[in-house]
Amino acid sequence: MNPDCSEFTVSTCKGSFDLKASVQIIGKDILIAVWGGDTPHIGAVSAAQSQPSIVDPKKNNATASVICFPGHMEDNLVKPMAEKIALSTGSNVVATGGTHWDNIDKDGIKKVLENGHALTDLIIEKLSTRTEEIIKNTDRNYV
């Protein structure tokens, strides 16, 4: 595999409304596919990047664009995920998401979104570990 490309998967293990993600690192960019439930699919796509804040250029913020297919609510899942990961990594991030549980209620939707935040943190943690490994291997190969 190209050293500038790698991939991994993560999942929440909360016991209900769990989510899975496949993460691909493509050069400096990150591509994430999130799914869960009875009928995984693609319901929304978000593309985010980190940039200097307009209010305080010494700080960064993230901005994202979202495409959400009609009748889907996964924009609420992938937009904050893409923004947080872009901000924490400085990378361009594309996140897709598609989850479906039959007869889900408002509490279930809330749990899915909570699991989305937990999944985001798992991805960031794994990306941090991956980056440290890449740096160590790069130093070893070129020193």
Image (tube, rainbow, N blue to C red):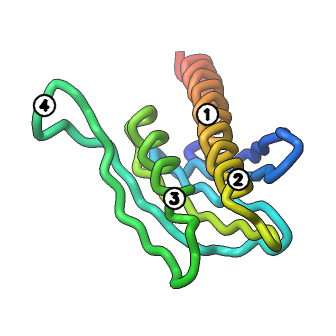
Label 1 secondary element: helix
Furthest residue toward front: 106
Question: Where 92 sits versus 37, above or below?
Answer: above
Q: Nearer the viewer, mark 3 or mark 2?
A: 2
Residue located beneath label 4 in the image: 57
For label 4, the crowd category at 10 Å Cα-Cα, with few meaning under 14, some 14 to 19 and many 20 or more, is few
Amino acid tagged 3: Asn
Q: CA distance from mark 3 to mark 4?
A: 27 Å
Q: Find out whether the residues at labels 2 and 4 contact each other: C-beta distance under 8 Å.
A: no
Residue located beneath label 2 in the image: 107
Q: CA distance from mark 1 to mark 4?
A: 26 Å
Furthest residue toward right: 15
**Total numbered circles:** 4
Q: CA distance from mark 1 to mark 2?
A: 21 Å
For label 1, the crowd category at 10 Å Cα-Cα, with few meaning under 14, some 14 to 19 and many 20 or more, is some
Q: CA distance from mark 3 to mark 1?
A: 16 Å
Q: Earlier in the sequence, mark 1 or mark 4?
A: 4
Which residue is depicted at the point 52% across and 50% down?
Answer: 30
Residue located beneath label 3 in the image: 76
Label 3 secondary element: helix
Q: Quadrant of residue 33?
A: bottom right
Q: Find out whether the residues at labels 3 and 4 contact each other: C-beta distance under 8 Å.
A: no
Q: Position of residue 57 (x, y in %)?
A: 13, 31
